[in-house]
């Protein structure tokens, strides 16, 4: 599959089989995350990989409201150490770069999951404080995204995108 086919095929998966995900595959997802770009190569991220099914289930309601997330065999909590970016880049590092860095890492995980035949979803709507308590996170690790991962239970349909004409403006004549 070409990269553009992979990127076009990737879609959020909101239903998982109970089949476990082999550690080897989890490691590949983490390598994809590690390869993401970050401002100044600061890599202000930390990834908590939860494979304890009871813990994932116990986070349903206090942390996230979707039952399908609770059913995932793997949950990666992507955390950011904003201060590490702030030390180098001030408020632009702390408020912007570090979040862009983690977003790039999340996207790499999602694309890698698709490549490995796994389903995954980017969860931004969760209770941050309850997540910190559930995973016992240190103060310098703010959770910014949760990614449930597993084998897809069905064939999720990718939602339509806006047309190019609406989202792109070319400036200049381009080259042929
Ligand atoms: C920052 C961000 C936060 C998101 N939060 C959630 C979420 O809390 N729950 C959810 O089901 N999907 C969430 N999504 C997934 C989007 O709904 C999804 O990416 C969008 O509808 C496009 O669908 P696709 O990813 O399947 O192409 C989030 C995506 C992003 C980028």
Image (cartoon, rainbow, N blue to C red):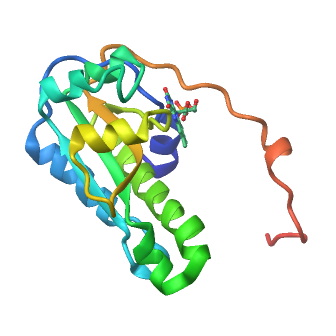
Evaluate whether residue 22 shows in this view. yes
Judge whether residue 76 can be spotted in this image.
Answer: no
Closer-to-camera residue (16/52): 52
Q: Is residue 157 above or below residue 35?
A: above
Please give the name of the residue rendered at 54% of the width and 83% of the height, measured from the top-left corner: 89
Q: Quadrant of residue 16?
A: top left
Q: Residue at x 49, y 67 (%)?
A: 98
Residue 15 drawn at (x, y percent): 35, 17
Viewport quadrant of the C terminus: bottom right
Q: Position of residue 27 (x, y in %)?
A: 16, 52
Q: Residue at x 46, y 30 (%)?
A: 12
Q: In the drawing, does residue 17 fall left or right of residue 9?
A: left
**Viewer-closest of 50 and 131:** 131
Image quadrant for the N terminus? Answer: top left
Residue 18 coordinates in the image, percent (x, y): 17, 17
Seen in the picture, residue 4 relative to 8 is either above or below; the reply is below
């Amino acid at each position: 599959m070409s990269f553009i086919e992979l990127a076009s095929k990737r879609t959020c998966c909101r239903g998982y089989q109970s089949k476990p995900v082999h550690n080897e595959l989890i490691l590949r997802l983490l390598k994809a995350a590690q390869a993401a770009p970050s401002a100044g190569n600061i890599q202000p991220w930390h990834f908590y990989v939860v494979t304890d099914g009871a813990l994932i289930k116990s986070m349903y309601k206090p942390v996230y409201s979707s039952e399908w997330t609770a059913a995932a065999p793997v949950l990666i909590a992507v955390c950011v150490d904003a201060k590490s970016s702030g030390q180098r880049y001030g408020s632009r590092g702390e408020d912007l770069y570090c979040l862009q860095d983690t977003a790039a890492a999340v996207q790499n995980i999602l694309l890698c999951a698709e490549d490995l035949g796994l389903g995954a979803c980017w969860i931004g709507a969760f209770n941050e404080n309850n997540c910190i308590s559930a995973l016992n996170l240190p103060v310098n690790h703010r959770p910014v995204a949760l990614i449930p991962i597993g084998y897809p239970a069905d064939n999720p349909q990718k939602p339509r995108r806006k047309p190019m004409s609406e989202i792109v403006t070319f400036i200049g004549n381009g080259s042929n």
